[in-house]
Image (cartoon, rainbow, N blue to C red):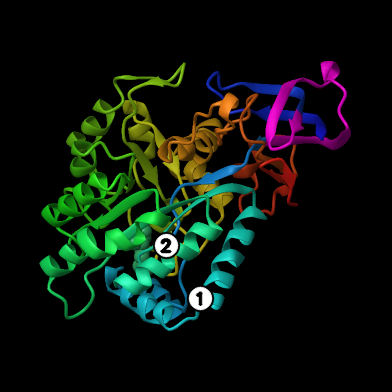
């Protein structure tokens, strides 16, 4: 079954050539994109959808979320808005509520959050454990996460539970907990920050997870300058996320990881993506991550929602893009790229292999997964020009129209 999507005013491909096509069309066959080009020369297809002169982008790739949770932290948010600083201790409130929730309800809550994201144009979602913090509940979160998200990250090292010895808890994460979650996860992450895990504890967790075959990511430099970025670079992590407090050495170190990468061909050795989380920065009143300086230094940047109940209770990638343009000084093209191709790079899903059916996401190109986001606007500029407006008109996820 093939579908021609035509009358596209602007097709922002986010492919390696960064093409923006006017008066374009796309053909979907099954779950893949089989043709893109000028509407006037589009091939015939089984079905046709006229999008009425609207803009089309790749679906958002949300590479950092925490969707497996129950409970509410409105009171903590109100206290923060009244002047209290964010402290990681709030995680414990969510851990208690999550442990007390049944499998059925936790699944329903997580699925609802994924649906909410997809209805706003997100077509590929990573999510993390991290609100279980014992072997039983981390494993349960990982298992449920693997049924609702595209990729799952083990974040047993999110917070040391109250009353536990940090070294003993780190041993638990590196040993029995890792072994139990391993069948359900592709990535490991650690909250490397004062009040969470030290550089040494974080290194221990990441090395154990790497030995177990997991890819690595780091929550780093969120609440102050710290060792997270340097650790991510040292261990060749796929991404370091938050990156609010960076010194020149941190930016240089991240840029250095990309010197073997050919951005024009998408080949060479990958570096560490800097994932900026602007909705979290606003909700915690932290300085915005220096996305402009990172891009200028040659670092590959991703934008993600960080949807979680403590620091960023939104899955709106459009909000992140608008903030990146209006406040972080990215161009619309750069911000959309970071929220699509950048996320795919951070999740190692920027490349596929048409022959074996492994589909790239985050860009509109032949052979890639047919993940399309049609805006109710003639150009992507409207994402920043009309911030906060419901601009999602239609969504195709893996070739299926979901909205
Ligand atoms: O990415 N920084 C650590 N983890 C989450 C927040 C978790 C919470 O407060 O519930 C984050 O911001």
Query: Residue at 64% of width from left, 48% of height from top?
Result: 121
In the rendered view, tell whether residue 119 sits above or below residue 167: above
The CA span between labels 1 and 2 is: 12 Å
**Residue toward you, 216 or 81:** 216
Vertical placement of residue 82 versus 340, above or below: below
Does mark 2's beta carbon lie closer than 8 Å to ligand 1? no
Range of the magenta residues? 27-56
- Asked whether 247 or 215 is in front, the reply is 215
Overall secondary structure of the magenta section: strand
User: Which dot marks residue 103?
Assistant: 1
Q: Can residue 157 be seen in this view?
A: no
134 is higher (above) or lower (below) than 163 = above
In the rendered image, the residue lying farthest to the bottom is: 100
Q: Name the residue under label 2.
A: 142
Res 368 seen here: yes
Along the line of sight, which residue is nearer the eye, 274 or 382? 274
Q: Which of marks 1 and 2 is nearer the N terminus?
A: 1
Q: What element carries label 1?
A: helix
**Magenta segment: does it hold 49?**
yes
Ligand 1 shows up in which quadrant of the image? bottom left
Q: How would you rate the neighbour count of disc 2 (Cα within 10 Å): few for under 14, some for 14-19, many for 20 or more? A: many
Q: Does the residue labelled 1 lie within 8 Å of ligand 1?
A: no
130 sits to left or right of 208: right
Location of residue 318 in the rendering, given as x and y in whole percent from the top left corner: 58, 49
Count of numbered circles in the view: 2
From the top left corner, tell me how far across and down residue 76 is, in percent. Answer: 38, 77
Asked if disc 1 and disc 2 are in contact, CB closer than 8 Å, the reply is: no
Magenta includes 195? no
Side of 233 relative to 258 (left or right): left
């Amino acid at each position: 079954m093939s579908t021609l999507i035509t009358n596209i005013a602007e097709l922002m491909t986010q492919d390696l050539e960064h093409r923006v096509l006017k008066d374009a069309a796309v053909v979907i066959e099954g779950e893949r994109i089989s043709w893109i080009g000028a509407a006037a020369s589009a091939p015939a297809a089984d079905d046709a959808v006229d999008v009425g002169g609207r803009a089309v982008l790749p679906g958002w790739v949300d590479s950092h979320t925490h969707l497996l949770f129950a409970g509410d932290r409105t009171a903590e948010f109100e206290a923060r808005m009244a002047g209290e600083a964010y402290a990681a201790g709030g995680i414990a409130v969510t851990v208690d509520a999550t442990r007390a929730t049944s499998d059925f309800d936790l699944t329903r809550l997580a699925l609802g959050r994924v649906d909410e994201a997809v209805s706003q144009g997100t077509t590929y979602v990573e999510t993390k454990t991290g609100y279980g913090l014992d072997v039983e509940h981390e494993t349960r979160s990982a298992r449920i996460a693997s049924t609702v998200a595209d990729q799952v990250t083990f974040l047993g090292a999110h917070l040391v539970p109250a009353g536990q010895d940090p070294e003993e808890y780190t041993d638990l994460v590196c040993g029995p907990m890792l072994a139990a979650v391993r069948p359900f996860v592709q990535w490991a992450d650690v909250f490397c920050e004062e009040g969470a895990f030290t550089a040494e504890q974080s290194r221990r967790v990441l090395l154990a997870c790497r030995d177990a075959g997991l890819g690595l990511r780091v929550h780093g430099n969120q609440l102050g300058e710290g060792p997270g970025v340097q650790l991510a670079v040292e261990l060749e992590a796929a991404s370091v996320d938050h990156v609010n407090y960076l010194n020149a050495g941190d930016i240089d170190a991240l840029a250095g990881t990309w010197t073997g990468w050919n951005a024009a061909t998408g080949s060479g050795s990958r570096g560490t993506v800097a994932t900026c989380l602007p909705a979290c920065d606003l909700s915690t009143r932290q300085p915005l991550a220096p996305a402009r300086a990172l891009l200028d230094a040659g670092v590959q940047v991703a934008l993600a929602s960080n949807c979680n109940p403590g620091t960023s209770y939104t899955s709106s990638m459009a909000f992140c893009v608008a903030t990146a343009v209006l406040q972080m000084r990215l161009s619309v093209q750069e911000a959309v790229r970071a929220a699509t191709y950048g996320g795919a790079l951070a999740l190692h899903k920027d490349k596929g292999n048409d022959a074996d059916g492994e589909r790239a996401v985050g860009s509109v190109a032949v052979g890639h997964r047919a993940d399309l986001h049609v805006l109710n606007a003639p150009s992507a500029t409207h994402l920043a020009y009309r911030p906060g407006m419901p601009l999602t008109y239609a969504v195709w996820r893996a070739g299926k129209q979901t909205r």
